[in-house]
Amino acid sequence: MRAIKVLGDVFVPIIPAIVASGLLLGIMSALNFMASNGFIALDTNNFIYKIADLVSGTSFGILQILIGYSAAKAFGANPYLGAVVGGAFINSSLQSAYTVASEGVQTMVTVIPGVYSFEWVGYQGHVIPIVIACAILAFLEKRLHKIVPEMFDLFVTPLVSVFVTVLVTLVAVGPIFVWAENAILGLIQALLTLPFGIGSFIVGLFYAPTVVTGIHQMYTAIDLGQLAQYGVTYWLPIVSAANIAQGGAALAVAFKTRDAKIKGLALPSALSAFMGITEPAIFGVNLRFFKPFIAGCIGGGCGALVCALTSLAASGTGVTGIFGILLCLAQPVQYAIMFAVAALVSFAVSFVLYKDEPKASEQA
């Protein structure tokens, strides 16, 4: 659980930056889509377009630096050293990871002749190796602060910490976690591409229980990994479906209950879930009465199934629910269908299953 909390501490602070670029990227994608299909005339030489295009890719271009800063802060290291570590892994001296697929690995660096060498390739598109590197950075920095004399600490500790961290990560730790991260993303992608949307249905069905346990805080890494590798994320629409479904289930409780207090809690909780914030609906209403929670899970699975069948993808992460459509402007109809299915199925199932608990006087 502590590891999950740390991942949350790493990724949550950078979500606003990802949202800013992601939303703008979604708008740009929608404009380009409409222009290419003749719906609008778009001047790509216009200064506003050029600046918007510049800003839309900025967060993703420096993502490793943002993660380095945030991760170092979460682990208790100097965040600026974390930013340097993150920047080192996307340094222009390294071959861009985005060119490996088309050009192959250009340079191998020998560690032990004839035994071991590693790829001189950047970490664009990778998230977890940067987090692990900052954990190493924090470990080194904290211990060096204790053993290095104060008069040398200012320059010895940062120098040794950053150098050893980058060295160890590039030579040994990085390749292992790059492989592991690619394997995890590959498994998730394989799950999401199972025939008839079965995998997506399973993910949508069980997403809400992971919110209860707190595991969902690590899912941003999946979004970022998919964005880096595919340019879009298929995960976010599924998450959005699961969130919307919990809102639909809570809304059914608000409509069916005769208890004014429950109605007063369920209605705003449902609206909050439709905006992408599910904790009030899950913990305040659905999980409390359990059957609406099950209904929300079923609705989430059905909404996720729509995502799979329509190949719904988002251009960024961090925004779900009603405003999630801004990340899917190239597929607004598909998003609206997903929203309707997730909300209506969960509402209907919850409305059928939910019953007010008898009051103590009635029981007597």
Image (cartoon, helix red, strand yellow):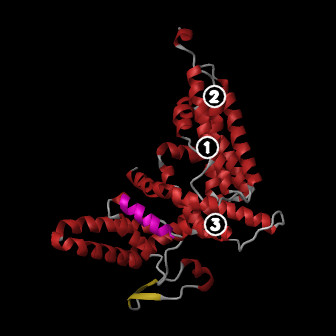
Q: Quadrant of residue 261?
A: top right
Marks 3/1: CA–CA distance: 26 Å
**Residue lying furthest front in this view?**
47
Give yes or no for residue 66 being in the magenta stretch.
Answer: yes
Give yes or no for residue 239 being in the magenta stretch.
Answer: no
Tag 2: residue type?
Val
Residue 128 higher or lower than 112, as above or below: above
Residue 288 higher or lower than 135, as above or below: above
**Residue lying furthest right in this view?**
38
Q: Which residues are magenta?
A: 62-73
Marks 1/2: CA–CA distance: 18 Å
Which residue does the numbered mark 1 point to in the structure image?
Answer: 275
Tag 1: residue type?
Met
Which residue does the numbered mark 2 point to in the structure image?
Answer: 253
Q: Where residue 92 appears, x then y in whole percent?
A: 49, 82
Which residue does the numbered mark 3 point to in the structure image?
Answer: 52
Viewer-side residue, 156 vs 191: 156
Q: Where residue 91 appears, x then y in whole percent?
A: 46, 79
Is residue 291 visible in the rendered image? The answer is no
Question: Which badge, 3 or 1, is on the more N-terminal residue?
Answer: 3
Viewer-side residue, 218 vs 203: 218
Contact flag, marks 3 and 1 (Cβ < 8 Å): no
Is residue 223 visible in the rendered image? The answer is yes
Q: Residue drawn at (62%, 37%), measured in percent from left and top?
A: 271
